[in-house]
Image (tube, rainbow, N blue to C red):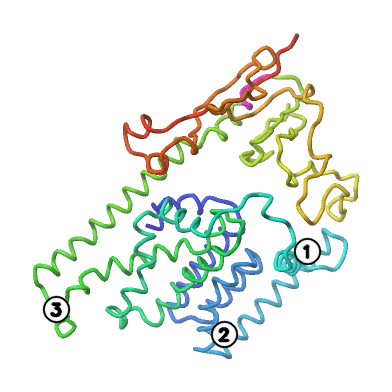
């Protein structure tokens, strides 16, 4: 399940702080189960300081129990690791920012104090992570949530150690569900634990029917329960493949469209313009050299967007005037003269209004790839790839790369 569930498949290849914390939680949990509390707590510190400071909540159960088990050894290990990493972090911050500061501490203070206006980037209801968890782990997620339910039956096997390792699932889900701004990547730290919890439940199937006075019970119903283990695992992996195929086939158009730029000839210092699709822009790393600028077009988004790095303002130590601590949009982030655009990337959906690229007298389509329209497609068919029905039931728009026509 760690290899093949859709959630782990995508999280493991993401270059994100939450992915780093996910690796750290996996390693710390493993070391804890191997009765190496000092090593486990050191890895936890690395995951928080070098990875994602907010993940401290997910590391808390293993950390506290490690301290209670071997306090002196674990405390010294945590203290030494923390001092070394924080010192290196502060020195690095001084080198780049030109003043003594701590980016780790600043990040925590800024977000805990309510800075950032993160709601500008979208808000979701309290059930968002439950729906998202089922999409990415299907029945594996359901079984993981049922772990507490099997404890009365499998207490001797799983309490307290495995319970300590798996408890961050409930803590993290509860805490993150209370935040108005939600993103799938915020759940990455607990993804491996979901697989562990589900595996424990599947392994315990025979225990539901086995007499506690006869651990070697070989009755028919116990045998059937044992057979159900690979059956349920196969069902989980099949549904995981269906989810992964749906994501790849339905939503890979943005990456493929930007690849086409590499094989297209144009004048140097061309301008690539992006409007409402700013959040699917992969990275300037994928933009060929002949594109001199990537510019945003104002399509109504009122949040702050990235700017090109300007070394003339003082390098990394500068605080450019167009940035602000509320994530509010800056007038300077948009290209107001759209005539300057050489290329345009946009998503054209079946809506009762026209987009910029619909004007074929101005724009020439270079590439157009199908993109799944989540608003018009049924939840079941867009979430999981069901052969034949997936193409038939879903609605698709076109993700387009367009070039301005020369007059």
In front: 207, or 312?
A: 207
Reply yes or no: does residue 86 show up in magenta.
Answer: no
In front: 323, or 117?
A: 117
Image mark for residue 46: none
Instruction: Judge the density around disc 2: few (<14), some (14-19), many (≥20) Cα neighbours within 10 Å.
Output: many
SS of the residue under disc 1: helix
Instruction: Judge the density around disc 1: few (<14), some (14-19), many (≥20) Cα neighbours within 10 Å.
Output: some
SS of the residue under disc 2: helix
Q: In this view, does 92 lie above or below 135?
A: below
Q: In this view, does 250 lie above or below 233?
A: above
Q: Is the magenta stretch mostly helix, strand or loop?
A: loop
Q: Mark 1 points at which residue?
A: 92
Determine which quarter of the picture holds residue 138.
Answer: bottom left
Image mark for residue 74: 2
- Could you give the CA–CA distance between mark 2 and mark 3, rounded to whole angstroms? 39 Å
* In front: label 3 or label 1: 3
Range of the magenta residues?
261-265
Q: Mark 3 points at which residue?
A: 216
First-in-chain label (2 vs 3): 2
First-in-chain label (3 vs 1): 1
Q: Residue at x 54, y 56 (%)?
A: 125
């Amino acid at each position: 399940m760690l290899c093949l569930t859709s959630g782990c498949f995508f999280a493991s290849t993401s270059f994100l702080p939450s992915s780093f914390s996910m690796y750290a939680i996996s390693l710390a949990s493993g070391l804890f189960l191997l009765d190496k509390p000092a090593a486990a707590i050191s890895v936890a510190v690395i995951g928080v300081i070098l990875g994602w400071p907010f993940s401290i909540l997910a590391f808390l159960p293993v950390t506290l129990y490690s301290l209670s088990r071997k306090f002196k050894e674990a405390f010294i290990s945590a203290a030494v690791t923390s001092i070394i990493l924080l010192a290196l972090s502060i020195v690095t911050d001084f080198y780049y920012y030109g003043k003594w500061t701590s980016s780790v501490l600043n990040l925590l203070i800024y977000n805990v104090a309510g800075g950032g206006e993160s709601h500008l980037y979208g808000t979701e209801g309290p059930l968002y992570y439950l729906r998202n968890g089922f999409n990415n782990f299907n029945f594996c997620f359901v079984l993981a949530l049922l772990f507490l339910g099997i404890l009365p039956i499998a207490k001797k096997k799983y309490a307290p150690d495995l319970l300590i390792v798996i408890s961050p699932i409930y803590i993290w889900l509860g805490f993150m569900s209370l935040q108005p701004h939600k993103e799938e990547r915020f759940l990455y730290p607990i993804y491996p634990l979901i697989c562990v919890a589900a595996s424990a439940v599947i392994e315990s199937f025979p225990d539901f029917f086995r007499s506690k006075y006869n651990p070697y019970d070989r009755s028919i119903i116990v045998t059937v329960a044992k057979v159900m283990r690979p059956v349920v695992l196969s069902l989980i992996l099949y549904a995981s493949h269906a989810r992964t195929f749906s994501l790849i086939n339905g939503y890979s158009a943005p990456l493929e469209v930007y690849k086409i730029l590499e094989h297209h000839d144009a004048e140097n210092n061309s301008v690539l313009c992006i409007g409402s699709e700013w959040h699917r822009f992969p990275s300037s790393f994928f933009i060929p050299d002949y594109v001199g600028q990537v510019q945003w077009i104002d399509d109504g988004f009122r949040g702050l967007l990235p700017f090109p790095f300007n070394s003339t303002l003082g390098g990394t130590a500068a605080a450019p005037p167009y940035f602000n601590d509320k994530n509010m949009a800056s007038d300077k982030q948009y290209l107001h003269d759209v005539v300057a655009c050489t290329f345009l990337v946009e998503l054209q959906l079946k809506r009762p209004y026209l987009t910029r690229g619909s004007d074929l007298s101005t724009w020439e389509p270079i590439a157009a790839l199908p993109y799944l329209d989540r608003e018009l497609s049924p939840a079941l068919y867009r979430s999981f790839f069901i052969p034949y029905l997936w193409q038939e039931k879903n609605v698709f728009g076109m993700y387009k790369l367009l070039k301005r026509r020369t007059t």
